[in-house]
Image (spheres, helix red, strand yellow):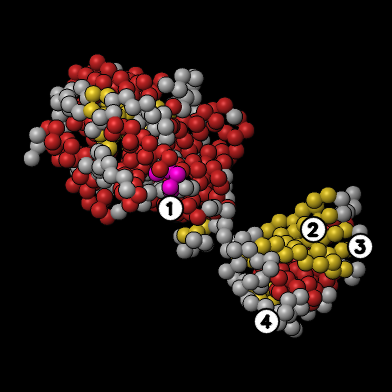
Amino acid sequence: MVKYALFLGCQIPMRLPSIEIASRRVFKTLGLEAIDLLGYSCCPEPVVSRLLDETAALATSARNLTLAEDLGLDMLTLCNGCYETLAEANEILKHDAEKRSRVNEILKHYGREYLGKADVKHIIEVLHEDIGLEKIREHVAKPLKINVALHYGCHLYREYKGSDIMRKPNMMREIVMQTGVNIVDYGLERLCCGYPSMQADEEFSLKHRLLPKLSRMRSKGAEAILTICPACTIQFEIGQVMLRPHGFQFNMPCINLMELLALSFGAPPSDLHLELHRSPVQQLINKVLGVR
Amino acid sequence: MAASLEEKIINHIREAAGGGLIEAYKQREKRVFARIKPEAFREAVKSIRERYKTLRFITISAVDNGLDMEYLYHFHIDSVVLTLKVTKPKEDNSLESISDIIPAANLIEREISDLFGVKLLGHPQPEHGLVLTKDWPDDKRPLRKPFEGALPPQARPVAEALISSGCVAPISSFIQRKREEAGLPKSPAFTFTDENAMREFHGIVKDVGLAEKAGFDWEKKRLRYK
């Protein structure tokens, strides 16, 4: 059985629990044992924590990594942001003896030591490499006949052990293809959704990042946006609401890959609490599945 | 080997300030710095004044760091320049005068009060009007900076949530209810669900000075500025 230490992060359990619900169902179906990390903290959020202090950011990541080391397991993340923060911290601490020593000097007061024994993996890698496409395809009981536009999210392009930045996005595409949905190529896949620039310049984020993507997705016939990153999901959902006062109406459902997998494996939509979405995901799924 | 004058001064400050001393060090030849807590500062100055008869007061530098005022008191003792540093939160906005111990500090304390808008305590002429006109408005002091820390406004809620709870997305009671309906625990196994984990996380945050850099108030569990 594939076994990992599960790092849930902040956004999924606190704001988008339907992704957590779906993920746990997918894990069970695919025989993936995910052990919850007890007492974990934010990965931490990189912009603010690094703005203040790099050692603080590294020490916080290192503490989270030691929780996985204590379990003797590699770490699995469901969020692109958590993946980048933790995988990057892991690489820095593994290879920079001075920074590792500084961080361990802090951790030792709490009986902890970062050893660099745990790897950090994104759920996309685990599904593709550990579970395999064939096994995923075998479990697809209800292929959803919908046109989806993929949004991979900027941090999915981050690579720490090689230089092929398309490795994980291609993996995601191949996983999605197993579910039977129709992927709509729209040419702006690599454009950022605008989430990180939202704090600095709302208008830029909405009109120069989100709007071109949504317009192109719709013009190419996409019925839904498919994401893997919770931050991008929030941007696509809240951003559509924020675009309305500017005269742009989209109302496009934004579904997470883990939700798509759970539904394709036959999970009843009502069990996934899709009503927690701020875009019409539930309405779309009910329509496609003929649920009243 | 006999102790140098710098070492003797450091030792004397250690004794005079006691638990009120934060640090004292020789920066280089003939240059000594000491950081002292505000509550121990006047006694330390008195003690140095009594011990070193050749002590000469140079001036006070005041620095507005946004959230705190830093005062650097420069003295000359024989051939050594000694700087005593005191930091006071701007919420307090007062400066205890040492002009009764060091009369020469009288004018520079008034100048600082005028330019930064800090209230002088125990000064014979605490009202402003040395370098500014008497009718100069209290809220427009020339060298006073806005009450702000290192973080831009957009980053403040994230930093506050991160430091106080270890999580940047506080959970609502609605989501807690929905989680329970779905058979999940009310909250994930975050730091704030475990007392020991929270203590450990806060310990690390304090050890690395993150809270101080962000301007976090531990008693109120929020940033000192909005």
- The local crowd at label 3, few if under 14, some if 14 to 19, many if 20 or more residues have their Cα within 10 Å, is few
Q: Nearer the viewer, mark 4 or mark 2?
A: 4
The kind of secondary structure element at disc 1 is helix
In the picture of the structure, the residue carrying the numbered disc 1 is B161
Say above or below: A192 vs A137.
below
Name the spot of residue A183 as percent of width and height, x first.
27, 24
**Real-space Cα separation, disc 1 to disc 2, in angstroms:** 41 Å
Secondary structure, mark 2, is helix
Residue at (38% x, 36% y) in the render: A212
Circle 1: residue type: Ala
Q: Residues within 10 Å of mark 2 (few under 14, many from 20)?
A: many
Visible in this render: residue A240? yes
Q: CA–CA distance between discs 1 and 4? A: 43 Å
Check disc 4 and report its element: helix, strand or loop.
Answer: loop
Percent coordinates x, y for residue A232 in the rendering: 36, 38
Mark 2 lies on residue: B10
Left or right: B42 as drawn, with respect to B146? right
At mark 3, the secondary structure is loop
